[in-house]
Image (cartoon, rainbow, N blue to C red):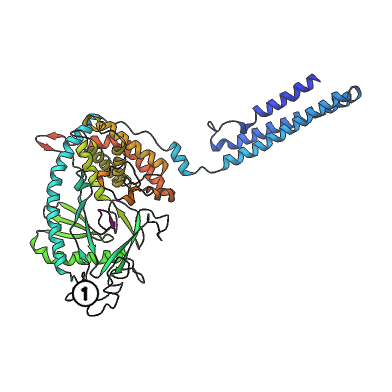
């Protein structure tokens, strides 16, 4: 009996230890060796079956002997036979489950999130400092002159545009607001580009009625956070408007908002007010065409005063202008028509020059760029003298631009880099941003961005962020709402996510070489290596 038990145990141990599917696939053979492996597996399984048959035969012989001697002992052998059969069945079931698991495809995003990232490479401190000292100083001096020119030219161009408009029927254009890298002092790459917001409003007696995605009652789809609609209404159509345009008040009644001489203007059709067809919602494409035509006519009236050429750089953008001087120098000017959100510094923009994701009509993107500019000014006053926060953003933007020229565009933009920096500024002590900490802070920014890519989640720096200082005066409706994920498109588009991850990896690998290659070297009083 003891020998039989020993044989059962040995067979079971051999079946378990030698079963090929109970081993890890870490050292799996190459595909061309699979046929040999399957052949050996079949031979091994045949030997096990032969051994099992022989064992069962011996067990039957022992059972017949034991039945003659002791009924209780015979029952124990039946028990062992049943146990061995159950264990063999369990092994076969486990084998099937393991085969199914190994045949399941591995999701691309899981593979990338676990194995697709490497830690940011360390860059030479001396090279970084030399890059900042030479490149950014030269850029700052040139940027100041360009900004001064752009502000004067934009004033002249918009004044010409206003002079052509009929205030009784045309949209009214306000003063521009400078935003973006040029007005935040971190622009480093060419071409020199200035972004200007140009607010506009409808003619009287019409007004814009705003509906945000975060409003209590809204018709905006839940998968479109960070946007809103602009409805063109006439005074008297809502509770807050004036009733003189919609009610018969009699000849003896006087409206304090609209005097008798001025009167109430004629109600215009939605088409005249740049609305989407069949609706009263402001259409981005119609606003774009109106603005392009207005800017073209305005430039035609003042072009004789300037000695340079102005063309539209991108017809898909409302006011993307390229200014080319006779010397060959180019300045890019983005005039962006926007709708102001009540009395705040938040605006509905027709498009984001720094973002490639856009909402379809009639949904407008919300821009808090003015508050972001104010936040950077806030930190500039509280960080150590000669702080490295803008240098970090300049270097990161420079490397991103160079990598884009090598491998093409991806979902990653300079606005994402700026957002990552703002998050780091809001969560790091001000003393950590000294000039000597440039390398470490740059590593921190890249590390934060890497984690954001792994999670496919990069929240807007100001929306739904309780860490933003109250001195920035971000409207309460944006402070208390849910955060907005700027990487939402990466969740929806797997191929775009893979392309962006590869772009980010290549950028980190190439960073030391690019910094060394494009750092200017002083020789005979001249600088070499342009940042173009």
Q: State left or right for residue 485 relative to residue 332.
A: right
* Residue designated by label 1: 254
Say if 27 sits above or below 137 in the image.
Answer: above
Most common secondary structure along the magenta stretch: loop
Secondary structure state at the residue bearing disc 1: loop
Is 459 in the magenta? Answer: no
The residue drawn where x is 24% and y is 67% is 202
Q: Nearer the viewer, residue 92 or 74?
A: 74
Is 357 in the magenta? Answer: yes
The residue drawn where x is 35% and y is 63% is 362
Give the class, few, some or many, for how many residues have Cα within 10 Å of label 1's Cα (few <14, many ≥20): few
Quadrant housing residue 336:
bottom left
Q: Residue furthest left?
A: 305
In the rendered image, residue 124, in percent from the top left (x then y), is placed at 26, 30
Q: Nearer the viewer, residue 130 or 422?
A: 422
Q: Which residues are magenta?
A: 335-362
Q: Is residue 477 visible?
A: yes
Q: Nearer the viewer, residue 378 or 136?
A: 378
Q: State left or right for residue 483 relative to residue 380.
A: right
């Amino acid at each position: 009996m003891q020998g039989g038990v020993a044989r059962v145990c040995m067979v079971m141990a051999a079946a378990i230890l030698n079963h090929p599917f109970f081993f890890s696939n870490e050292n799996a053979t190459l595909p061309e060796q699979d046929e040999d492996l399957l052949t050996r597996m079949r031979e091994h399984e045949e030997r096990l079956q032969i051994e099992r048959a022989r064992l069962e035969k011996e067990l039957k012989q022992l059972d017949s002997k034991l039945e003659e001697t002791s009924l209780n002992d015979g029952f124990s052998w039946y028990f062992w036979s049943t146990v061995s059969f159950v264990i063999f069945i369990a092994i076969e079931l486990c084998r099937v489950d393991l085969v199914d698991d190994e045949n399941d495809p591995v999701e691309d995003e899981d593979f990338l999130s676990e194995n697709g990232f490497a830690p940011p490479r360390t860059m030479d401190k001396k090279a970084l400092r030399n890059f900042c000292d030479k490149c950014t100083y030269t850029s700052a001096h040139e940027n100041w002159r360009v900004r001064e020119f752009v502000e004067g030219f934009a004033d002249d161009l918009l004044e010409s545009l206003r002079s052509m408009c009929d205030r009784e029927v045309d949209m009214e254009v306000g003063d521009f607001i400078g935003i973006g890298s040029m007005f935040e002092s971190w622009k480093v790459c060419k071409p020199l580009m200035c972004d200007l917001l140009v607010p506009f409003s409808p003619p009287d007696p019409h007004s814009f009625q705003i509906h945000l995605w975060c409003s209590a009652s809204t018709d905006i789809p839940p998968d479109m956070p960070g946007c809103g609609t602009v409805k063109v209404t006439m005074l008297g159509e809502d509770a807050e408007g004036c009733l003189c345009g919609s009610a018969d008040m009699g000849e003896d009644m006087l409206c304090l908002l609209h005097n008798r001489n001025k009167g109430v203007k004629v109600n215009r059709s939605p088409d005249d007010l740049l609305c989407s067809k069949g609706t009263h919602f402001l259409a981005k494409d119609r606003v774009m065409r109106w603005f392009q035509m207005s800017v073209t006519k305005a430039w035609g009236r003042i072009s004789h005063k300037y000695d340079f050429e102005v063309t539209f750089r991108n017809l898909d953008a409302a006011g993307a202008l390229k200014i080319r001087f006779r010397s060959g120098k180019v300045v890019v000017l983005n005039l962006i028509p926007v709708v102001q959100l009540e009395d705040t510094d938040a605006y509905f923009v027709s498009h984001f020059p720094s973002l490639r994701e856009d909402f379809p009509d009639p949904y407008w993107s919300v821009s808090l760029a003015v508050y972001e500019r104010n936040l950077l000014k806030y930190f500039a006053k509280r960080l150590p003298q000669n702080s490295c926060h803008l240098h970090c953003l300049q270097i990161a933007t420079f490397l991103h631009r160079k990598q884009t020229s090598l491998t093409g565009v991806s979902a990653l933009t300079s606005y994402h880099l700026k957002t990552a920096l703002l998050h780091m500024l809001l969560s790091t002590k001000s003393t950590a941003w000294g000039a000597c900490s440039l390398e470490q802070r740059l590593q921190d920014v890249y590390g934060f961005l890497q984690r954001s890519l792994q999670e496919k989640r990069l929240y807007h720096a100001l929306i739904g962020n309780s860490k933003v200082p109250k001195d920035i005066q971000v409207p309460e409706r944006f402070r208390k709402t849910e955060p907005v994920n700027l990487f939402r498109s990466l969740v929806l588009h797997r191929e775009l996510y893979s392309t962006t991850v590869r772009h980010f990896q290549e950028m980190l690998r190439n960073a030391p070489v690019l910094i060394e290659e494009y750092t200017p070297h002083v020789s005979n009083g001249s600088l070499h290596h342009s940042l173009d």
